């Protein structure tokens, strides 16, 4: 039997990881500037956490959840998204306690799992980056988080990203709009796709989000939820727009934008980028003020977003973002002889403790082959260590491109390599 990775998964090979690390480093740098701190939650949770959070009729639960009974006969699920787990951690660890300053700002980076048809930028195991902000309902919070997302895209180097904005209003607004939408769609029920027929009675707002061309034509003239906002929700949304404009953040009002998860209210948003004529959502989020209370916590407003790292990387590569290259190897130690291999291990560890990136040969190949390895690893400097050098303690350190070299001792390199390293690099040109 030929062993292969499961369908819908990917091996992240060492040559790819520099890009992943670049994205994650930029995310941490930007988010921590906004005083967000990292949280890590379990990869699997009780099934009920996700079924309650996303709604029993959501596509995540009905089609996409990886769930199973474990050996203790417990119904568990691999996490399909990050918000529910973060809310559970917020409640379980009592991060709502009065002595903890509000808002509580957290971000996460990790694997998520959904059993869906693999497609461009989507996998069954995928990696998501998300942020959650708990404890404050204020249009300024919504705007700050959206501004942070834009700042992140700018920092990474993603261009042509457009903010799409909508409001789902409060519960009364949503209830009124839900009925208006059912009244509008019912005469078209026979023409709707099978998924939209089901959604019409379970979650009619999701029909607006359909990708089927026939559904798109029908919903083009659907009533706008903005016409059903309560006075309070309308004022809130107006303030969000004003503050975005004050920050010179352009946006598009998209009244057909909804959420597949039942816990959203008021502001929702997506950042969308056009790649080769196709619009791709790179980030999506919004406000969810009832979820903490739904999970037996106190009444707690919240706002956040999530984005898929695979899709972000695909977009970055399409736009030829200049990723920072991996750091080159500082030193390669070529080794010849049994006595030399022991000293090479000592010298390698000494240099690493001095914070140099070092590799040594383990193969006893001819020196010419070892020097080829130094070239492939882009080593700045090469030290050749044979049994004679091990015995005398005298070695030569050579610059791999200029071929300039310095005669020194193993002891000097082990004690403080910096003068030699800097001298050879300064004289590189």
Image (cartoon, rainbow, N blue to C red):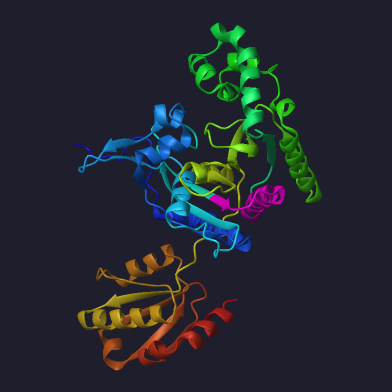
Q: Can residue 123 be seen?
A: no
Q: In the visual, does 427 lie left or right of 296?
A: right
Residue at 40% x, 37% y is 124
Q: Quadrant of the C terminus?
A: bottom right
Number of numbered discs on residues: 0
Q: In the visual, does 308 lie left or right of 71?
A: right
Q: Relative to 7, is 135 above or below?
A: below
The prevailing secondary structure element of the residues shown in magenta is: helix
Residue at 34% x, 40% y is 77
Residue at 43% x, 66% y is 375
136 in the magenta segment? yes
In front here: 290 or 306? 290
The image position of residue 47, as x and y in percent, is 35, 38
348 in the magenta segment? no
Q: Relative to 290, is 32 above or below?
A: below
The image position of residue 258, as x and y in percent, is 60, 30
Residue at 57% x, 45% y is 305
In front here: 54 or 135? 135
Q: In the visual, does 92 lie left or right of 149?
A: left
Q: Can residue 396 be seen?
A: yes
Magenta range is 131-157
In front here: 389 or 193? 193
Residue 348 falls in image quadrant: bottom left
Q: Quadrant of the N terminus?
A: top left
The image position of residue 64, as x and y in percent, is 40, 31
Residue 376 falls in image quadrant: bottom left
The image position of residue 248, as x and y in percent, is 79, 48
């Amino acid at each position: 039997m030929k062993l292969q990775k499961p369908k819908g998964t990917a091996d992240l090979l060492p040559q790819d990881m520099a890009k992943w690390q670049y994205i994650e480093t930029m995310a941490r740098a930007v988010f921590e500037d906004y005083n967000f701190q990292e949280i890590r939650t379990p990869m699997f949770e009780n099934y009920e956490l996700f079924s309650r959070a996303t709604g029993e009729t959501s596509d995540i639960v009905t089609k996409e959840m990886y769930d199973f009974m474990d050996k203790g006969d417990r119904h568990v699920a691999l996490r399909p998204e990050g918000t529910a787990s973060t809310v559970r951690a917020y409640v379980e660890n009592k991060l709502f306690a009065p002595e903890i300053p509000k808002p509580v700002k957290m971000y996460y980076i990790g694997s998520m799992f959904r059993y869906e048809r693999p497609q461009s930028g989507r996998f069954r195991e995928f990696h998501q980056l998300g942020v959650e902000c708990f404890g404050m309902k204020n249009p300024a919070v919504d705007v700050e988080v959206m501004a942070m997302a834009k700042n992140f895209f700018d920092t990474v180097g993603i261009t042509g990203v457009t903010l799409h904005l909508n409001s789902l209003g409060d519960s009364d607004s949503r209830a009124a709009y839900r009925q208006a939408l059912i009244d509008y769609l019912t005469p078209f029920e026979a023409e709707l796709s099978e998924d939209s027929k089901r959604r019409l009675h379970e979650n009619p707002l999701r029909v607006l989000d359909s990708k089927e061309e026939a559904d798109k034509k029908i919903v083009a003239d659907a009533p706008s939820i903005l016409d059903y906002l309560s006075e309070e929700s309308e004022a809130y949304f107006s303030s969000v727009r004003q503050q975005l404009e004050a920050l010179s953040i352009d946006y598009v009002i998209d009244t057909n934008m909804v959420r597949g998860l039942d816990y959203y209210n008021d502001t929702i948003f997506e950042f969308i980028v056009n790649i080769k004529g196709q619009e791709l959502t790179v980030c999506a989020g919004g406000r969810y003020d009832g979820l903490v209370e739904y999970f037996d916590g106190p009444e707690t407003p919240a706002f956040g977003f999530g984005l898929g790292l695979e899709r972000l990387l695909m977009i970055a590569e399409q736009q030829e973002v200049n990723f920072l290259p991996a750091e080159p190897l500082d030193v390669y130690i070529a080794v010849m002889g049994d006595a030399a291999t022991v000293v090479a291990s000592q010298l390698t560890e000494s240099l690493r403790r001095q914070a140099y990136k070092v590799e040594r040969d383990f193969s006893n190949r001819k020196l010419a082959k070892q020097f080829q390895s130094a070239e492939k690893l882009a080593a700045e400097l090469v030290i050749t260590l044979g049994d004679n050098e091990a015995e005398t303690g005298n070695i030569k350190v050579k610059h791999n491109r200029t071929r300039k070299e310095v005669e020194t001792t193993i002891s000097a390199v082990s004690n403080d390599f910096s003068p030699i390293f800097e001298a050879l690099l300064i004289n590189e040109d």
